[in-house]
Amino acid sequence: MKRDLASLSNKEYDLLVIGGGIYGACVAWDAALRGLSVALVEKGDFGGATSANSLKIIHGGLRYLRNGSLRLMRTMVRERSIWMRIAPHLVHPLPCLMPTNRYFASSRLAMFAALTINDIVSYDRNIDIDPQKRLPNGRTISKEATLRVLPGLPPDDVTGGAIWYDAQIFNSERLLISIVESAVHSGASAANYTEAVSLLHDGTEVNGVRVRDVLDSQELEIQAKVTVNCAGAWADTVLGHLGDRSPGPTSRLSIALNLVTRQIQPDVAMGVYNHHPEAGGSDGENQRSQVLFIVPWRQYSLIGTTHAHFTGPPQSLEVSEATVQDFIDRVNVAYPGAALMCDDVYHVHHGFLPTDEIGAADDEVKLLREGRVHDHAQEVGIDGLITVVGVKYTTARHVAQEAVDIAVAKLGQKAGPCRTYNTPVLGGQIERFDDFLTDVIARRPAGLGPEVAEHLAYTYGSKQHQILNYLGEDPILGQTICEAFPVIKAEVIHAIRQEMAQTLADVVLRRTELGAAGLPNEECIAVCADLMTAELGWDQDRRQKEIEGVYAAYGKAKMATRTH
């Protein structure tokens, strides 16, 4: 996967995708698999904005039973199974537990009924699937059993618990990169750090974009028959390039925050209630409850999600210490056993989600439940332009399929059917994950520890041999970056040569797992910087700027020590 902007201006593409988050990546992959010529541009790095803000859960929509949305549940159940099939190394089953209480809507009886319906709706979830991916039926458990698993709950508030199973992404950044790679492998052209600065249009039809190379400021035009706007929080900015013909806002934005903390519960994701008294009452039946999820991930916990209304341009978003402290306080109220303090928070993920409308309470955020695809020819008479408004990781593939279906109809040319539902991403060519993992560990090269082999299997799947090939070039590349992580030096070289990593932050935050749970230590950052300096020929000023860029990505300032 190489970055070659010059080649993008040499042809007219069937489809041009603006935005390299999970939705844009899925659109590009789907279209390329159907035989369309595709270009994908992203103004930052792939997955560097809202797609980086995730609880890493692929869920089956149990929460939507409350609204009777069986159709949406069915869609999400199907997509959960698809993700486990097409990315078997990256998506795995996740047990979930929610305590029940004396109020009817969250009682053991109500949850038993909900779990029963959930199992009926997902009746085919285990058909022809890897045994490691099978999801057991849901069940309720006693108060005593619930408190053994979640001892930090106030006993008087608990009557039992409900257990069900969803799925978790081992590394959401790697999943997105794998999809971009899969699109390129299928014939798409892709470029990060390529900003769409204007739409090429004649007032009634869009036929491409003018882009700016963020790395050297040069501009060029990319011609396309259909342009798909997957710019996320910046989608309306892209539409603004139409001037007076702009269709206007596609949605309101809300801020979404997730925390990475010390591990609170290692075995099960817990859904706990954070109650907000409604006006005119404070008892349990008159409270509006937000469910917070505390999810085990590696040796950490992911906690989310809290939402707040947002106004202003997306680039103006800043998360204050007071906002983080308020989130911590909410977690401690919902699950007193967490006893979180500021020092327990290693990383704060933030991004945007689209809202539907303002809720009954002034501070309530009502999110869109489903992604939307806007055909602007139908809405405002602008042909050749589609906008995708995404909501969930779980349904990104499904919404992308809808968008490409519309694009194919616009193109009026023969194209194959959607194939992303049964085509593994690159690295996903695995029949049985447990057998694959055992084999990778057993066949690891001499000197490579089992924990490193396991890490490579989960991270790169059936592509892990590509990383090991670098060890033949230089055995030193089999060394770990530092003791804290099983990441080896070959992964940094691979990220540069094959995965379009342009900056040190690209490698630390998105190509490897070094920065997934927070700012790595100085040694780790320095070793990565040295590898990239040697590979790319950076001078010492560039090296220092790259190190400072990593600290800035975490909202921290750091003047790195210069080396000469």
Image: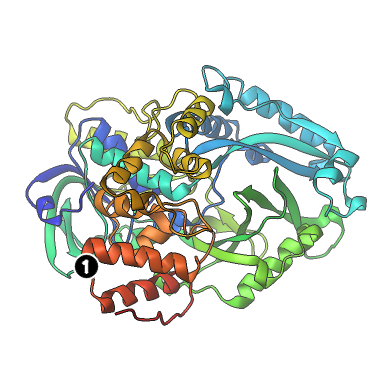
Q: Tell me the residue at 42%/31% (across/down).
A: 86
- Going by the picture, which residue comes out furthest to the left? 10
Question: Is residue 68 at all visible to an observer of this figure?
Answer: no
Determine the image quadrant of residue 42: bottom left
Q: Nearer the viewer, residue 383 or 418?
A: 418
Name the spot of residue 377 as percent of width and height, x first: 26, 46
Amino acid of disc 1: Leu
Q: Is residue 382 left or right of residue 53?
A: left
Q: Would you call the spot at circle 1 few (<14 residues within 10 Å), some (14-19), or many (20 or more)?
A: few
Q: Is residue 267 left or right of residue 196?
A: right
Identify the residue position indicated by label 1 in the image: 215
Name the spot of residue 187 as percent of width and height, x first: 20, 37
As helix, strand or loop, the secondary structure at mark 1 comes to loop
Q: Nearer the viewer, residue 281 or 562?
A: 562
Q: Nearer the viewer, residue 52 or 311?
A: 52
Q: How many marks?
A: 1
Q: Is residue 501 left or right of residue 411?
A: right
Determine the image quadrant of residue 401: top left
Name the spot of residue 534 as percent of width and height, x first: 25, 64
